Amino acid sequence: MTNNPARPLHLRIALVGDFAIGPGKADLLEGIRDTGSIAAAGRRMKMSYKRAWSLVEAMNSAFREPVVETERGGSARGGARLTSTGEEVLATYRRMMDKAGKAAAPEIDILKSMLSPDATSNANGD
Amino acid sequence: MTNNPARPLHLRIALVGDFAIGPGKADLLEGIRDTGSIAAAGRRMKMSYKRAWSLVEAMNSAFREPVVETERGGSARGGARLTSTGEEVLATYRRMMDKAGKAAAPEIDILKSMLSPDATSNANGD
């Protein structure tokens, strides 16, 4: 899996059974909020429409209220928007990431300080 | 990916370039420490010997000092043990997980409280 340098921390939380929330579902919710479309949100993440739909369906089933509402009979494939539950799930996940990232920062610095200078200079380019 | 109920938090840190440390590498280090063998540590995780070796090699290259030392010419496939660097990487990762988990706990509780009762009861069996 390729790292995203802008997001060194990859955090996934198992909530119940096989249902977890991590960067994929959070980014998808954010994309739907920003684009008003499940298809467009998926494309932004290079995720198939089928995969994006299946993640939305998994979230809609797992939470008490749906996280995404779709408008059938609208424009091509209809529009989609976050419900208030979807907004809350996204905001809660982002807040959790922020807190976990701050808590983990000293240990991340220690691990980085233990890296080989070769590994560091190679990654910094040329 | 299947969730491990004993470890709801899955945390991976991108340290440099494509090199990250997460539960797989941490568990492998712990297994080598406990079993004295890369092969046995891999088996414990249902990981192929080849995969276990490649993770050890990636860590040995990325850090300034090797994290695992192997004894060639010993028993079958030789023994392996963590170096002091390996012990420190493992302890630092575990401490980071612990701090991040505590920091994230209130948001995890919020997300769990938003789950559908059906999702919860199905996962609890029957």
Image: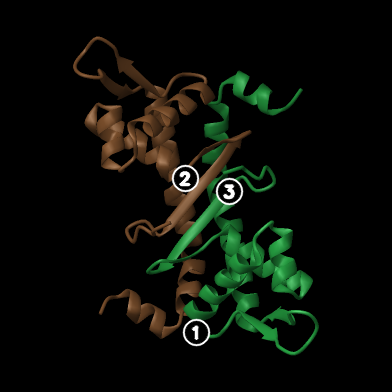
Chain colours: A green, B brown
Q: Are marks 2 and 3 in contact (CB under 8 Å)?
A: no
Q: Which residue is mark 2?
A: B96
Q: Nearer the viewer, residue B6 or A58?
A: A58
- Left or right relative to A88: residue A41: right
Q: Position of residue B51 (x, y in %)?
A: 40, 33
Mark 1, mark 3: which one is toward the viewer? 1
Q: Are marks 1 and 2 on the same chain?
A: no
Residue at mark 2 shares a chain with residue at mark 3: no
Residue A28 seen from this side: yes
Real-space CA distance between mark 1 and mark 2, rounded to the nearest whole angstrom: 32 Å
Cα separation between marks 1 and 3: 28 Å
Q: Secondary structure at mark 2?
A: helix
Give the residue at x 54% y 60%. A22
Instruction: Give the answer, above or below, for where A59 lies relative to A22.
Output: below
Up/down of B82 relative to A100, above or below: above
Query: Quadrant where the C terminus of chain A lies?
Result: top right
The x, y position of residue B81, in whole percent, is 30, 23
Pointer 3: what residue? A9
What whole-number distance in Å separates the C-alpha atoms at marks 2 and 3? 11 Å
**Disc 3 residue type?**
Leu
x, y (%) of residue B50? 38, 30
Residue B28 shown left or right of residue A46 in the figure: left
Q: Is residue A95 visible?
A: no
Q: Secondary structure at mark 1?
A: loop
Q: Which residue is mark 1?
A: A64
